[in-house]
Amino acid sequence: MTFHYTRTVRFAETDAAGVVYFAHLFQFCHEAYEASLAAAGIDLKKFFCQPKIAFPIIHSEADFYRPLTCGDSLEIELVPVLLDPERYEINYTIKVGDRVAAKAMTRHVCIDAHQRTRQAVPKFLLNWLDQWSNE
């Protein structure tokens, strides 16, 4: 099942032309990611603040199909995909109404936060992947 997150574009997130500054799209996506983790029962403070395991982004990309402007109500659809035992990606579709305005993707690797070595994605995150995956 796809996770859905809604938010409104704020004036401060736009540039001099009145359009969302491109980097803010990843901020919006990360908000959806955090909301999906919380909705799955994951404690965000433990996940982000003092982790034994970390999930850094190793690749990101975005495509823009129409401008996003102040006051637009966004619906962000999030679908995670397990790539292999150590990596996953999150695909985002950003809509204004029923029109796709942008698509984005972040790819993450699971590491031991102290030794910085790769490790398998833990069970609690596999559960999150299963909950929001379309497979």
Image (tube, rainbow, N blue to C red):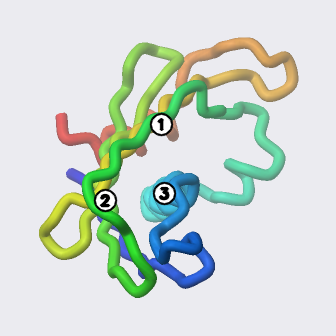
Q: CA distance from mark 1 to mark 2?
A: 14 Å
Q: Is residue 111 above or below residue 73?
A: above
Report which residue position mark 1 lands on: 106
Q: Which mark is residue 94?
A: 2
Horizontal relation, residue 60 to residue 101: left or right: right
Which secondary structure, mark 1?
A: strand
Identified by mark 2, the residue type is: Ile
User: Relative to the observer, which residue lies in front, 108 or 15?
Assistant: 15
Identified by mark 1, the residue type is: Thr
Q: Which mark is residue 25?
A: 3
Q: Residue furthest left?
A: 98
Circle 3/circle 2 CB separation < 8 Å: yes
Q: Is residue 86 visible?
A: yes
Horizontal relation, residue 117 to residue 103: left or right: right
User: Relative to the observer, which residue lies in front, 68 or 79?
Assistant: 68
Residue at the (45%, 60%) spot, across then down:
32
Residue at the (31%, 39%) spot, across then down:
130
Residue at the (46%, 78%) spot, across then down:
9
Circle 3/circle 1 CB separation < 8 Å: no
Q: Count residues near mark 3 (Cα–Cα under 10 Å), then give few for <14, some for 14-19, many for 20+.
A: many
Q: CA distance from mark 3 to mark 1?
A: 12 Å
